[in-house]
Image (cartoon, coloured by chain):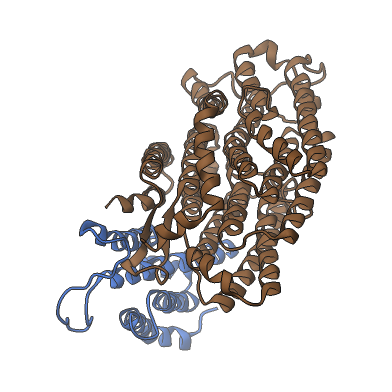
Chain colours: A brown, B blue
Amino acid sequence: MSDNLILAPVFIHLFIAIFQLIAWRKTVTQRILSVGGALVALISAAMLFTHVYVHGTITLNASNWKAPFSIVFVADLLGATMVVLTSIAGFAVSIFSATGLSRQRMLYGYFPIFHFLLMGLNGAFLTGDIFNLYVWFEVIIIASFVLMTLGGRRNQLEGALKYMSMNILASMFFLTGIGILYGMTGSLNMADLSIKMHDVQNRSLVGITSVFFILGFGIKSAVFPLYFWLPSSYHTPPSAVAATFGGLLTKVGIYAILRVNSLIFIPDDFTKKLLMVMAVLTILTGAFGSLNKMNIRRLFSYLIVCHIGFMVGGIAIFTKLALMGTVFYLIHDIMVKTNMFLISGVIMQLRGVITMEKLGGLYKEYPKISLLIAIVLLSLVGIPPLSGFWPKVYLFREAFTGQHYFFVAALILGSLVTLYVIAKMWAEVFWKDIPADVTVDNKFEPLPFLRKLLLLIPIGILAIASVYIGLNAEAIVQIVDRIAEELIDTSSYINAVFKK
Amino acid sequence: MRSSILQTATRYLLPILLLFSIFLLLRGHYYPGGGFVGGLVASIAFVLHSFANGTDATMKLLRKKPLSLIPVGLGVATLSVLVPVLVGLPPMTGLWLEGDFPIVGSIGTALFFDLGVYLVVIGVVLTILFTISLTDD
């Protein structure tokens, strides 16, 4: 029976969405359903995680067919961790959207689509079938198209067009790769593929297929040279949407690269080199791109790209410690990046603009809020003992011992640029006096106390999560250590699927 | 522009198409057909009606907004997926009632899943088409 727990995070979001569709245009009901439901989903995700942590990987054969013929849902430690992170971020964003989003957007069905998106994310993290993974990706991108275009402003549609065309291209690469895989092995079950790939004689075709997957997932996770759609679309939707996108969507790509490259393809020298070149260039372009951005959300978008490079680099090295660094960074990044976009939303409420030239004086006016934000910014930069520091230790170490000096240089440069732009942003937005010619459009001050609090609580939740990850790094390292172990030695995953 | 030929033909075609859609829905488990195709045929029946008599007349015929069919269909499909969990089997396991039933053949969870798909397809197609044709006016 406990195996059915796997699908709880998926079905809870589906039910929330259905009930919200029934309560169409009743925004108060929808908001209550969203926040309450997200909390229930978070609890179920936590239960799933503890179960997996204590008892090991669990699987569920949908329709009661035996693997490899059924669609298998697998909750290994990596999948369960991702579901927990998604649920925490989803819960925070849900509170934030319930208070911060305009009524107009809710009337046009923001909440049901948001929960369909979270359902898709949870499904993608839990499926053990490569074609099913594709289907979840489709659920995710369809939901995200709607979220991105909801509101229908001109620049939103422009951003959505780039986003959509690149993502459809990515899906086509992904689908082509699946087609070739199926042609070679006759199986779509990832554990089964993992066994059968060893026997495939045509190694060059295997190499080409792995490139198809890297291309497809690379576009989705915004690596060089396929990242340009991200900074040109993520600043257009409202902050709550951008937070979900920035925090979670690109990370699904990283998750998929990790999953596919550990189970189906074991990275050979060519793949590693390819990933490494992509990682270094991603870090550099992301970092340089962020240098001259004055729009805060654009700046954050480039930082997303930059930090994606850190994780891809860890996968490229593919040693246990490097994978630990990657997964640890993933955990840290989801919390922090979601929070960054929520913060940009609060700044938008406080000042009505998010370009740095027109901002200033926030520290003088709102010292407490500023300090809360400072914690998040410091975690992002990776000041010890906050959460961004620990994964970098692993990445640096492995890059050095593996003699990937370009990656070391890129890591240093990426971290320094992050520090520089965040320091610049802090000075411009919080310390500098507000420019004399700017009239402030403060939507925050007239709000009742409860709504002010509800806007800040999600940032607080995610900040506490970041601080917890940083201060309690030992516990996280234990989890991450087991995840990396499972990624390198996949036998526990395969045995769980075939119930050996 | 109203054509009396189309209007008269629709009067007969609408029930026939709806019957045909239900036929497709019911034979879907073992033969070509199923909820998706059935739903499309059913929505074509209403689209034809709206061509002949105008979208407003079709809205009146349907009484409720087609949008409300989407959650109902999703709910039916999801519940049919979860019914096996109650008897301790994994979700989506096909459970069938013993014996044959007239017209339907056999009744099982798969039939209700198809019924859910059928409703969702009608809801989505009609919502899209009505939205387009109403903004045109």
Q: Nearer the viewer, residue A390 or B48?
A: A390
Residue A201 position in % (x across, y down):
63, 77
Q: Residue at x 66, y 70 (%)?
A: A206
Question: Residue A71's image quarter?
Answer: bottom left
Looking at the image, residue A221 lies above or below residue B12: above
Q: Residue furthest front?
A: A401
Residue A96 visible within the image: no
Residue A113 visible within the image: yes
Query: For the image shown, how many numbered marks are present on the structure?
Result: 0
Q: Nearer the viewer, residue A77 or B24?
A: A77
Looking at the image, residue B95 lies above or below residue A382: below
Residue B56 position in % (x across, y down):
45, 66
Q: Quadrant of the C terminus of chain A?
A: bottom left
Q: Nearer the viewer, residue A474 or A182?
A: A474
Q: Residue at x 61, y 62 (%)?
A: A265
Q: Residue at x 36, y 49 (%)?
A: A8
Residue A222 position in % (x across, y down):
71, 51
Looking at the image, residue B37 lies above or below residue A172: below
Residue B20 position in % (x across, y down):
35, 84
Looking at the image, residue B19 lies above or below residue A207: below
A248 displayed left or right of A405: left
